[in-house]
Image: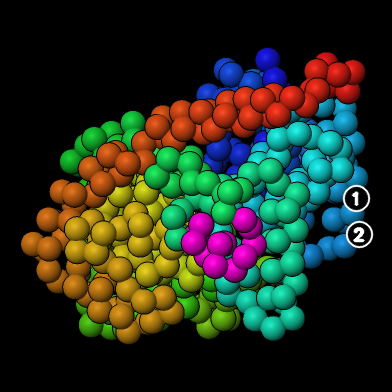
Amino acid sequence: MFKLLRITTVPVTLTVLLKSQLKFINNHFEVVAVSSGGEALDELKKDIGIKVKAVQMTRRITPVQDLLALIGLIKTMRVEKPLIVHTHTPKAGLLGMLAAKIAGVPVRLHTVAGLPLLERAGVQRRILNFVESLTYRCATMVYPNSKQMMEIILENNFCSPEKIKLIGKGSSNGIDTKHFDPAIFDKEYRKRHRPSMELKDNDFVFCFIGRVVADKGIHELVSAYLDIFKKNENAKLIIVGPFEQELDPIDPLIYKEITSHPGIRWVDFKKDIRPYLAISDVFTFPSYREGFPNVVMQAGAMGLPAIVSDINGCNEIVRNGINGLIVPAKSTEKLQSAMEALLYDQEMLELMKVSCREEITSAYESSFVMNELLKEYNIQVQNYFSRGEVYLNKRYV
């Protein structure tokens, strides 16, 4: 059985996004999960029985720490001798692909789930452009997780067309629709559990789940909601996710509203987000940039219409007027109009609810995505051997 290293910057990506995928792939390859160390990485080993390796990485630009992480990854690869290295997230992608190239790993794969550089300009943008191009040059294949992300990469000449491919119809992992199933929560669930969050049965609840940072459209969301609340105090907003004030700080006034406004309920990161979706009416996700956001698919699988920004990924999952509404990114006015439309038009809301789950189960079921990824791994292995290169040597056996 050939060895496969999966690398992410922080372990939460492995434990929340890729856990089921790692377990599935481990039946076909010997999987080693690599990420920054911590309890989450140790729990992954216990939960699904795969080997894990800790290499400390940061999400910021930290030259000294980054060099140490690169050396650590090279050492890990030379010890583990994988046939395939597959990276996710920008920093893990750069360091992982560089390390794999230096260590002589023959199959080097990178998944692109988002491009932070799209919201940057000037010198910072030029630096990020170089970093992105370098990552792709070191990779043997690049997998954007949405059609529009692939188009952006090609338009910016980050990668040659023959080196880039979409797995399935998009998404990094798909959605386990048996887990994200509204049928798990009976009709009385909302009545029983809303009081625990100081919500009444007749409240109309908007929900956001994700990192509470500026790039997720938090300023626009909170501003739109505050105006709605002035006119209708039965409108409530649940925000589930961590603040990241060091990496992407939000305005202090918005922070204060999130943590103290009578209509807003803020909850820190939760492994299981289903209870919050189950007591909500509409999912709101006005992000500036995404790859293929899992949380929008999760909300849809739970039967929630979504209001999303008109960006890649989001506008591929949501069909405007069918299973949600699409609004321009960074427009508080358009976001508020969409939120009020679903707040006051019960008939439109109910029609969208009917379509939500079907839109997800028909195209983004996780078993489909995982099997498509397994096919791609096998194709890349076959391609490597078909080139006649010697792999089974002393370094790898």
On whether residue 156 falls in the magenta region, the answer is: yes
Looking at the image, can residue 130 be seen?
yes
Q: Residues within 10 Å of mark 2 (few under 14, many from 20)?
A: few
Horizontal and vertical percent for residue 188? 20, 41
Residue 365's place in the image compared with 392, above or below, is below
> Mark 1 sits on what residue?
68
Q: CA distance from mark 2 to mark 1?
A: 6 Å
Secondary structure at badge 2 equals helix
> Mark 2 sits on what residue?
64
| Residue in the picture at 69% in, 24% down | 385
In the picture, the quarter occupied by the N terminus is: top right
Q: Classify residue 78 by image quadrant.
A: top right
Q: Are marks 2 and 1 in contact (CB under 8 Å)?
A: yes
Q: Classify residue 310 by image quadrant.
A: bottom left
Horizontal and vertical percent for residue 176? 39, 35
- Of residues 356 and 149, which is closer to you in this image? 149
- Number of callouts in the render? 2
Secondary structure at badge 1 equals helix
Q: Classify residue 351 by image quadrant.
A: bottom left
| Residue in the picture at 26% in, 59% down | 319
Horizontal relation, residue 219 to residue 300: left or right: right
At label 2, which amino acid type do we have? Val
On whether residue 301 falls in the magenta region, the answer is: no
| Residue in the picture at 38% in, 69% down | 309
Horizontal and vertical percent for residue 89? 64, 52
Q: Which residues are magenta?
A: 149-160
Horizontal relation, residue 373 to residue 62: left or right: left
Horizontal relation, residue 60 to residue 279: left or right: right
Horizontal relation, residue 191 to residue 393: left or right: left
In the picture, the quarter occupied by the C terminus is: top right
At label 1, which amino acid type do we have? Leu
